[in-house]
Amino acid sequence: MSEAAATPQRPVILAVDDDPAVLSAVRGDLRGRYGRHYRVLTASGGAEAIESLERLKVRGDPVAIVVSDQRMPEVTGTRVLSAALALFPEVRTVLLTAYADTEVAIGAINQLHLDYYILKPWDPPEERLFPVIDDLLTDWHAHNQPSYAVTRVVGSRWSEPTHRIRDFLQRNQIPMKWFDVDASEEGRALLEAAGDDGLPLVITPDGTALHMPDVATLAAALGHRTQADAESFDLAIVGAGPAGLAAAVYGASEGLRTVCVEQLVAGGQAGQSSRIENYLGFPAGISGSDLARRAVTQARRFHVDVLAPASVAGLDLGGPYPRLELADGSTINCGAVILACGVAYSSLNVPGSSGLEGRGVFYGASLGERDTVAGEDIVVVGGANSAGQAAVYFSDYARTVTILCRAAELGAKMSAYLVDQIAARPNIVVRCGVAIDSLGGDGRLESVAIRDGAGPVEELPASAMFVFIGASPRTNWLPPQIARDERGFILTGPALGGQRHSTADGDRDPYLYETSAPGVFAVGDVRAGSLKRVASAVGEGSVAVQFVHQVLRS
């Protein structure tokens, strides 16, 4: 192979504007900043831009970003960006607008999921252009890795271990290529070449073949950190969902030596959300996995030790300082602890459900299953935001999506914007006031039997079902000194009913979010009375750090 053939093509940044002066300015800014690592191309109109995009598609060239002016004759900027997304679904899109066109930009956010709009002029580019492009390029590269950096997975779509591996890779945004051994000749060839020693088979980018690995083994093979650099920290955080990551960022940025321990994947339940559209500062919405990736990057920038996957087996409160006991036998001593260990979705517990878990029955939004639901009839169970987000996401791939909800209407627990989106999707059917009677299938889910009140049982064909029916806190590992309510959620602050903490400086009331054990705090979904929203979890995590400082000072 020649050197030229072996060299990967540089990703394209395409700039579009019919004003020669503006096009020259944006070309100069983009080439000056990004020309070394990207091909910066330009088009002097919408029609020319679409022709360029079609040529790039035919040639197989990667397109990372399209930056287009809105007001162009005949072919507008939104039409250019729509064409770009049709040809390159992962492309990042930016609209250049005048102040008078902001309503058009907001419409593009709703219709095209426009990534960003920039008001003209964008001087100085160091403040108004480059940070936007830098951020979008980081996002694009997270989802578009060269083939040699891709982890390959061979397994059955009806295998629970295969589902678990795929879900782990997808939620960590590890580039993955999936081969269904029942349908893919290439997958069967890989299995034969690696030796048929059991499925799933995972081949890492360096060529290591792992047969039937558990998540911890796979994580270690991919270079994930599962052990801390030290044994003592100012602050230890259990759980890397929005609350835990917010606490980690605020704690470390304020000088606390911080460790964050996550048993599986950063992001928590929010990390499974296909698109969070009501989180402040992201007008185009953001996926839960993208939000988690950004937060982990931010935490590591402040030198937080993020350990994942790493399980905490116990919390020892018998000494002068709290001590975490990890499942691998190691320990972490700390001045204060923040419990952000989250919740797990409750099991369905109907006839036929237990034998079909991972074989068509999934708890939470297993977004990595989008390929397996393509063209299929699927069911989403639940009536809150997580269920609505999953239904909207899968409706782009499945033939039909049926939402089963026990409440009389979706709006009882679901945000209005999701209710509106669901109503606008013709392939989503909503069934309220129904209960699941049983599940059917031989080795995989094939049908869901439902009952509407006292009416007869109705059978729905379904190849997959995603369940969001309440949650249980992950608190079974905690010692009895940590007070909990009847459902296992951790009691904090005023909810402790007047309990006082004895300290070297005398008795005091528990701080906000402090548990029944001094110096141990609880935030996010695991805390009794929390709002179960991403924004509130982030707020609780950041506020708790202020009380951690007071504990450490005393």
Image: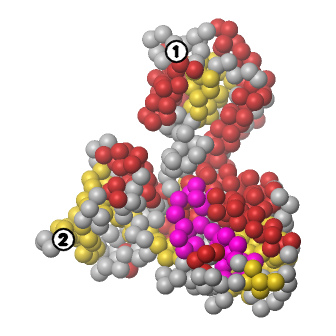
- Our reading of the magenta stretch's main secondary structure is loop
Q: Quadrant of residue 289?
A: bottom right
Looking at the rendering, the stretch of residues picked out in magenta corresponds to 510-538
Local secondary structure at mark 2: loop
Task: Judge left or right: residue 269 versus residue 140.
Answer: left
**Which amino acid type is marked by label 2?**
Gly
Coordinates of residue 530 in the picture (x, y in percent): 54, 67
- Image point 73% across, 83% down: which residue? 501
**Can residue 369 be seen from the camera position used here?**
no
- Image point 81% across, 83% down: which residue? 506
Q: Is residue 110 magenta?
A: no
Name above or below for residue 78 compared with residue 501. above
Q: Quadrant of the N terminus?
A: top right
Q: Which mark, by number, is residue 453?
A: 2
**Can residue 408 be seen from the camera position used here?**
yes
Local secondary structure at mark 1: loop
Dot 1 corresponds to which residue? 71
- Image point 37% across, 75% down: which residue? 348
